[in-house]
Every structure is written in C-alpha cells, then in structure tokens.
Image (tube, rainbow, N blue to C red):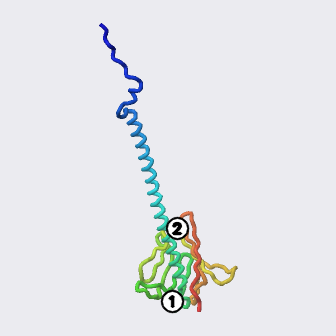
Amino acid sequence: MFRDRPSRPALGAWRCRRGFTLLEVVVALAVGALVVLVAERLFTSVADASHRLAVARTTLDRTENARRWLAAALGSVEVDAPSGQSFEGHADRATFTTWLRTSGGWWAPVRLTIGLSDGRLVAAPVPGNTLVLADSVTSVGLDYLLAPRADSPWAWEWVSGVSAPLAVRVRVTKGAMADTLLFVIGERG
C-alpha cells in the first residue's frame, strides 16, 4: 500500500504567517533602545546648556549691576565734603562720602570704602552692610586722574584733604583675567 507523503507547503504559504520572529523582536527592541538613548542624551545636553546659560546670565547681570552701582556711587561723590570726610584714595582702596538712595527712597550722604576683602571686591558703608561687587577677585588696583588733559598722569594715591580726583580707574583681576573700569567723579560746583 502506498502511503501519501505529507505534502510540503508551497513557497507562498511561509509568507502568510502571523506574528514576528524572535530576531525581528530583538532588532526592533535594539533600535528602540538606541532611539531612547540618543533622545536622553540630547535632552540632557539641552538641559545642561540651559543651566549654564542661566548661570552665565546671572553672573553677567550681577557684574553689570555692580558696575552701575559703582558708577552711581562715584558719580555722586560729595566733592566738597567737610573736614575729615574728604576723598581718601589709596592703591588698593578708596574711602569717600557719596549720596546713595536709602531704603525709604530718599538720598542721604554715606561714608563708603571700596576695596578688596577676602577675595571679593566690596563696598562697605559706614555704618551698614557690606555690598559684594565681585567674587573670586585676586587683586584690585585703583588710580586717580589728576587733571582733565589727554596726557594727564594717573596717581596711585589721592592725598588732598580738600577735593576729589576727576576720575577713578579700577583694575580688577580674577585669576588670569583683568578688567579695567573707569568712573568719572560727580559734578563740581
């Protein structure tokens, strides 16, 4: 007797299967994991860049606010201050009387010292709280303009007990970086 051999499925029958092979599932998972990894690194780098930008913006705002405050303080120096309250300028600090806005909104004369303290450029009113103008400062140098001429020399100290210099040049060094700021002293007469 002849037995029928089981017939083989036709070539097209193999293509009509339902589901995925294990290899296809593994490849799909690997591609999905790669996409997730790239997206995570992209979002992390964007978040880090955003944080660095926020820190840089805060630092720049603080620096510009300090410069504006210094310009206002030196621009309001009481040039004809009474005896004992005159402008005293040294190579590393300056002490003077200036008009500053109070917390109540009015202007009042304040005796102020600007200089280096514990690695920071500070403005110390007497009496009052110290205002930090710059952090991580390695040195501060001040020069004083003697006369309003193009070739006028700058002095390292201001010793006149009668008047104030025409301008103050402040050199602030932070590590290897140096910044030079020029402030004109308030109006005369």
Residue that protrudes farthest toward the left in the picture: 1
Q: Amino acid at mark 1?
A: Gly
Q: Earlier in the sequence, mark 1 or mark 2?
A: 1
Residue that protrudes farthest toward the top in the picture: 1
**Is 33 positioned to the left or the right of 133 in the image?**
left
- Quarter residue 172 falls in: bottom right
In the image, residue 43 above or below residue 139: above
Quadrant occupied by the C terminus: bottom right
Per the rendering, the mark at residue 138 is 2
Count residues near mark 1 (Cα–Cα under 10 Å), then give few for <14, some for 14-19, many for 20+: few
Image position, residue 35 (x, y; %): 43, 45
Instruction: Report, in whole angstroms, how far the alpha carbon at label 1 lies from the one at label 2.
Output: 31 Å
Image position, residue 116 (x, y; %): 50, 73
Depth check: 164 or 155 in front? 164
In the image, residue 20 above or below residue 149: above
Image position, residue 175 (x, y; %): 54, 64
- Quarter residue 48 falls in: bottom left
In the image, residue 77 above or below residue 25: below
Depth check: 100 or 96 in front? 100
Q: Amino acid at mark 2?
A: Thr
Look at 46% across and 73% down and name the residue there: 132
**Is 150 positioned to the left or the right of 70 in the image?**
right
Residue that protrudes farthest toward the right in the picture: 151
Say which residue label 1 marks: 84
